[in-house]
Structures are given as structure tokens and as C-alpha cells.
Image (spheres, helix red, strand yellow):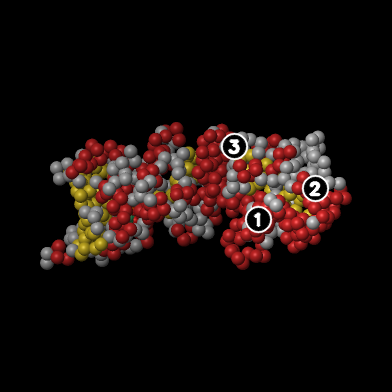
Amino acid sequence: MNASAQAQTHEFQAEVKQVLDIVVHSLYTDKEIFVRELVSNASDALEKLRHTQVTEKTIYDEELPLEISISSDDQANTITIQDFGIGMTEEELIENLGRIAHSGSKAFLEAIKKEGATNENLIGQFGVGFYSVFMVAEEVRVFTHSWKPEAQGYCWKSDGSGSYSIEPAEGQRRGTKIVISLKDEYKEFASSDRIKAILERYSSFVPFPVSLNGDSINAVQALWLKNKNEIKDDEYVEFYKFQAKAFDEPQAWMHFSADAPLAINALLFVPGENMERFGFGRMEPGVALYCRKVLIDPSPKELLPEWMRFVKGVIDSADLPLNISRENMQDSALMQKLGAVVTKRFLKFLNEMASKEVEKYESFWKGFSVFLKEGATMDFANREALSKLLRFESSAKDKGTLVSFEDYVSRMPEGQKDIYFVNGTSRESIEAGPYLEAFRAREIEVLFCYEPIDDFVMNHLGSFSEKRLASIDQSDIQLDAVASPDEPESLSEEESKALCEWLKETLGENVSEVSVGNRLVKSPAIVLNADAMMNANMRRMMQAMQGEEASGLKAKVNLQINPHHGLLKNLASLKERDTALAKEVACQIFDSAMVSAGLLEDPQEMVQRMYGLLETVSK
Ligand code: ADP
Ligand code: MG
């Protein structure tokens, strides 16, 4: 039978077509990345074979060495990349090369959906894996034979437009051979010098022998086992790109080894970009686990705490049993110890960066603070170290300057017991709001938080170096009276007391308590949170999460009035002359204070009342 009679044509999945379209109409200036992608796939396939060999008795072409061979032909304008790895069955060809199920391309696609294909910078952050070959290829043929002894050999073929074909192919060795016919304008890649130059940059990180046109071109080495002094910065950078399959440059790395309590060689990288910020899902753990250079798990789930998922790299421990399986790894005490030791070292590394390389740390903080905050709320064992790494703007410093809890504590005057913070949408809104004025008048430093998660962080931490963390809208904060020489005349004590009683009666259930406050300078009134467990932001978040059902979460507030303020002085006499109007004014003062606190839920009633009052004053 004619082989091509058996060729089956398949359409690419719609998403793949989309990726191919972008790849071909090329966003990448860097065409050569396809070499790295294919070599990385070949290396993955060999790694998978190595694992399969542990569990399976019969493997097709068992005796073949675990190697990658590359050949280029500048007459025929082709490059061939062959591995003796795990290979693919027909179903796997369809699944892996016809659909998007794999990591790189999926992330790429999600990012495009979100940002639009126009953002070249963004696109440049991704590898599109196998499909990148169509940047340079006119046609690609993938010859493969799975490790499964009963499987057949196949040839997958496509020009990268809308479809591909698969047909049986006799005489295949185990693994995968990819034959790339180059487009005319990219025939430079058929030159062996060009390919060699590309491969030389990272082939030493490929954990299998690589040859080009028959000559070996790499000495396999595990960079993380080498001595730090012998490694150049660009070797670290290339290693990061290869190992993490990354397209950015790492902003920092930590390379350490220890003999006790465990034998560890670790090389951890902080990426340049926080990929979660681009809006596609949660990252998988990025630190691979090795035992004496042998990969045990490329993405171990239980090794490092969740918040460290942004970290890439390698941990190698000679103390792990080589035959450890991924299943029993999870509850192994050894794994926990290993993870704990590396986490502590990493925190120490960040702490040193924070004190010695302030700018570098702050730029890391900009992109990755969310992970440290998550850690501060979830990682109980490392809470203290994490809390030292947190940074805030502060009322004591200019916009843009960041301070730590330690900075704050070092400036605390004797007698001050709490560390004060406030959460608001921006520095400007905090400074314009009524809460800060009491602290400003007394020159008490307040930390500024701008993100909703900050409240959870503060709440979980509770204190720092035995100083309570207190939100300045909390009603149990006692501040000393400030004597201000030019303070306007105040209501008398009696008048104030009567006004408070009347206000409580008028406002009814809406307030727990009305009192004269010493917190206010310019504002007529504020509401303070009377709920020690939950501040305004947290309540808003709970309400957003639980919707209407959260009615039980109605804010418990105290109203504090400013007896020096003209409005309150007027109100004290208005309530004797015109009770109806005084009641309207009282409600309006209360609602305005609620707005400042971010607690007013439905402004409609207030708006209507306001129109009524305006009508009265404009008579
Ligand atoms: P990723 O490597 O991120 O999974 P790729 O697009 O690079 O994505 O590859 C897609 C899938 O195709 C791989 O996950 C793998 O299952 C399969 N594949 C690619 N190249 C090979 C190969 N040389 N040998 C075996 N399988 C391969
Ligand atoms: Mg890949």
C-alpha cells in the first residue's frame, strides 16, 4: 500500500491556529529561540524516558543512549534535531502537537487574550514551545516512535498553516526526530557555525550529551554543583533562561551549599518579571528537585511554601534517596526539612539585599511584594522574617520613600506603644481624609497601605516586635490631648455632653456611641471603627465576597465630634430652635463621616437629603 494513502489530515485546534498566526507573522525578533525550544523538548523527552526506565520493564530500543543529535545541511536548507527520548504515539502527536494543553503556549495564549497581540513586550516574555519552529520553517516533519514496545512509528507533517497530517512511518528509532525545512530567508540556520554559536550558550546546561554534525558540543555539567567563584554572571543568566524556560533576565540569584543539617546545593533565581501580574493563573512551583544531578521532580508541590512559587531554580540534595518517588516525597520528613532550610536561607538572602542593596530590593518589592504579603499571612513558621521584609510609605517620609517596621520602631518616641497604619486607595486620599489629622497634629508616624490585602497582613501579624499594629480608624486608640494655642473656642463640657446625647438619640441604631473626640482638628466629625476584629476595608472585602448576605456585617461605629468646629457649635443651638432641620443636619454630618470612612453603603438617601438642605440654605 502507498504510505501516503494512509496519511490522515487533521485541523489544528483553533487556539493553535491563533498561536501559529502570531508566531508566523512574527512578533519575535529573536528567531533563534526555536533552537532552544526544540532542544529543551528533546531534553525533557530524555528525562521522561529516564523516569520511565525506573518503572517499566520493556522499553522499545532499550539500548539506545540518552542523547541529542543535531545535524544541519546547508545544501538542502534543513536542520534535524533527534533525541532518543520517550517519543510519541499517534494519540500523543495529536494531543501534544495539535492542541494547546502544554504550559508555555497556554500561558502565551491567555496573555494575548488579556492584553491583545499587540503588546510585543509582553509576547516576548513567553516561549511558544514547539510552535516557535514555524517562525523559520517552511515545513516541519516529526518522525517519532514511542517507548512503548507495541507502538508504531509515525510521521507528523505540517507547514504551519491550518492543518497537519499523520501517517505511519516504518523503521523509526525510539524517540523523536524533527526535520525542519527552512524558509529561504532563514537559511542562515542551516549553517553549522550559526547553530553551533546558538547551542554553545546553553548546551552545557542540557543534562544529556548534545552533538552537532557528529561532533560533541557540550560537557554536561550541573552549574549548581560548581564553585561560585568559577561561574560568570552571564552563565547564571543563561542557566536561568534554560532551566526556567524563561525569556526575561533574572534580577537576583542565590547560590549556596551546605553540609549540615543536610547536604544541599541550591541555586535560586528571582525572575525579572512577575508573570502572575500579567493576569494569567497561578504559577506552578519553579524550583526543581535533584538528587546528585538526577532530576527527581521538575515542579515539586510540597517542597517550598506556596508564596515562594515565583522563585525558579534548582535544589540538589545528596541526602535524598535516589529512588524517592513523587508520591512518598510529599510526606517525607526529609523533604520538609530540606524545604525549611532553603526557605530560611532565601529569606536571609532577601534580608541582606534589603539592607545592603536598597534600590535593588525596592525594585524587587515593586514586582513581587504580593508574594511576601501572602507569605506573611500564611507561612506561620517564617512570619517574623517575612514581616521584616515588608515595606510601606509613611507619613514621616515623602511619597515614594519606603520604610520597614524596623525603621518605624527605631523612630518611635518613648511611651508610644502601637505601630499605626492606615489603609486608603492612595496617599492623596489618606492625607485629605479625617483620620490622619489627629496623628499629624501630634507628629505621630503612620504607615500608609494602599492594597486591600494589607489589612489582612496587618491583622494576621497583629504585632511587630511586641508593638501592636493598630489601624488609625480603630476607636480604642487613645491619644494625648494636644494643646493648640490658636484653637477656636469650644462648646462647653455641658453643651458638648448634651449635644452627644441628642445625637445618639437622633442617629439611633446607626451608631454605638457618640462622644467628644480629641482626634479632630479641622474635620467636624469622624466615625471610628468599634469592631476590634474588622476594619472598614476588611468589611468591604467581606461584603464584596458575600454580597447581600453580608447584612450581618453592618459596620459597628462610634461617632466622635469636634466641639471646636463651627458646624457643631451651630448645631448645638439649632437643635433648640428648629429640631426638624437640626435632625437633617445631624444625619448629614454622620453620613459625611461615613463617606470619609468608606463605609456608606447607599448614598441615595444622603444625596436626597443634601438637596433638601441646599434648598433651605439657598432660600
Ligand atoms: P512544553 O514543552 O511547554 O510542554 P511545547 O510546545 O514545547 O510545550 O511541547 C508540546 C508537547 O509536545 C510537550 O509537552 C511534549 O509532550 C511534546 N513534545 C514536544 N517535543 C517532543 C519530543 N522531542 N519528544 C517527545 N515529546 C515531545
Ligand atoms: Mg517545550
Residue 529 lies, in percent from the top left, at 71, 54
- Please indicate whether residue 288 sits to the left or right of residue 538 in the image: left
- What residue do we see at 25% from left, 48% from top? 81
Residue 503's spot in the image, x, y percent? 79, 56
Q: Is residue 409 above or below residue 15?
A: above
Residue located at (29% from left, 53% from top): 20
Given residues 164 and 174, the one toward you in this image is 164
Q: On the picture, is 578 further left or further right than 404?
A: right
User: How many angstroms separate mark 2 from mark 1 (CA)?
Assistant: 23 Å
Mark 2, Cα crowd under 10 Å, few <14 / some 14-19 / many 20+, is many
Q: For the point 64% across and 39% down, which residue is it?
A: 394
Task: Give the residue displayed 21% in from the left and 63% down from the top.
Answer: 9
Name above or below for residue 264 compared with residue 156: above
Label 3 crowd bin: few (<14), some (14–19), many (20+), radius 10 Å = few
Up the image or down, 197 lies above or below 577; here it is above
Ligand 1 lies under 8 Å from the Cβ of mark 2: no
For label 3, the SS is: loop
3 or 2: mark nearer the eye: 2
Beta carbon of the mark 1 residue lies under 8 A of ligand 1: no
Secondary structure found at label 1: helix
Q: Earlier in the sequence, mark 3 or mark 2?
A: 3
Separation of marks 3 and 2 at Cα, in angstroms: 36 Å
Front position among marks 2 and 1: 1
Residue that label 3 marks: 399
Q: Is residue 426 visible?
A: yes
User: Which residue is tagged 2?
Assistant: 569
Position of residue 28 measured from the top left corner of the image (x, y, whole percent): 31, 44
Q: Residue 611's mark?
A: 1
Residue type at mark 3? Lys
